[in-house]
Amino acid sequence: MTKLIISYARRKHADNYRQSLGVISGFVGILCNVLLCAAKFLLGSLTGSVAITADALNNLSDAASNIVTIIGTKLAGKPVDKEHPFGHGRMEYISALVVAFFIFLMGFELGKNSIDKIIHPTNLNFSPVFVAAIVMAILVKVWMAYFNNKLYKETDNINLKAVSRDSLNDCISTGATIVAMVVCHFFGIPWFDGVIGLFVSVFILLSGIGIVKEILNPLLGQPPEPELVKSIEDIMLSEELIIGVHDLIVHDYGPGRIIASAHAEVPSDMDVMAIHDVIDNVEVRINKELNIIICIHMDPIVMDDEEVDRYRSLCAEIVNSYNPDYSFHDFRVVKGDTHTNLIFDLVVPHQKNFDKQAVIDDISALFKAEDEKLNVVMTIEHSFA
């Protein structure tokens, strides 16, 4: 069925394939969750199990999550406008946070009911028919988890990943109710239903925290995937006139809406118009192949100068000996009557308790040890990629 749905969306909604899958996921989820809610609420009433009743309420909240998924997908698909020149793609992240809220709500509600069940235990009504019905509900949720995970891989819609994770949580919580029923019936431990429910509520809350972390990362700004960085750099360095790339910054405004900037090192003795033409071609190629709008800044680098090359090699040797994880770029040499300025940017990894001035003093001392007339003018920065 999953393949049929994907094939239908690809055939009927080719121009809006990604959005259509998000909407289809929402409607399928609403239908399944409403039916499961009704069935579990009936079972919970017949068995007296707080875990099953809470699970029914969870399915109702899942249906609300599916509605949020539909709304979020629709809003994220809106075109750019005057107020939102970068589009509305991040609405997917915001709507996914709402889905996470429902997960937290269910976890807290289940925890509260479970504690009450431990304090005031009641016997459960056991029947193989009830167990069989619950197993059927688990199978439905397993399919929903698979279905939404498959659509997530097709669309990269983080809402679908959250819904898939929530469906897996439901499988675990519903499976736990079967364990509770069996233990309560065969071992006569009425409070065990509440204990199982409490453990499940903790698991659900931890799962919700994990989902929130995944959503907050792109909202707050996270480094791009190494594969994407390599793809951009490979395209830029494929041009003969571009001899180095640094200061690559990637801004994610939602799936399919990525804007980037980078510095391209080019020979200083080349014709500016020729270099500009190369840069333009690279920007167009990155946009076409990676669907990224990029602005590239030109950094002229002195080439084939024996003295500059000697100082550059010295700089590479000193920086590598000080810390092999450090790198540098934008290297320039400015000679004076009394001293020579070596100007460059030092790139260091993010680290705690970093003492910038100590690094400057240490590296400057290493250069002074080589030549007292060398004066280091160094800017320390962190990589954005």
Image: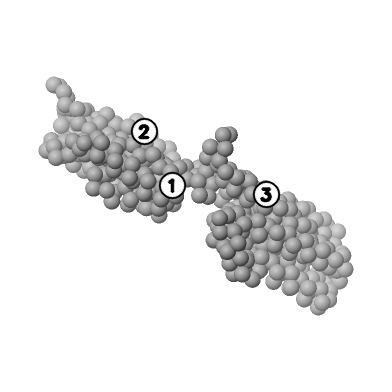
Position above or below: 23 against 270? below
Q: Is mark 2 on a helix, strand or loop?
A: helix
Quarter location, residue 121: bottom right
Q: How crowded is mark 3: few (under 14 residues within 10 Å), some or many (20 or more)?
A: some
Label ID, residue 292: 1
Q: What residue type is labelled 2?
A: Lys
243 or 348, nearer to the observer? 243
For image coordinates 81% across by 67% down, the residue present is 39
Point out the tag, 1 or 3, that comes first from the N-terminus. Answer: 3
For image coordinates 29% across by 31% down, the residue present is 378
Q: Are marks 1 and 3 in contact (CB under 8 Å)?
A: no
Judge from the rendering whether residue 237 lies leftward or rightward of residue 100; answer left or right.
left
Q: What residue type is labelled 1?
A: Ile
Point out the tag, 1 or 2, that comes first from the N-terminus. Answer: 1
Q: Residues within 10 Å of mark 2 (few under 14, many from 20)?
A: few
Q: Mark 2 points at which residue?
A: 356
Judge from the rendering whether residue 103 lies leftward or rightward of residue 361; answer left or right.
right
Q: Name the residue under label 3.
A: 71
Position above or below: 238 against 167? above
Between the residue at mark 1 and the residue at mark 2, the CA separation in whole angstroms equals 34 Å
Label ID, residue 264: none
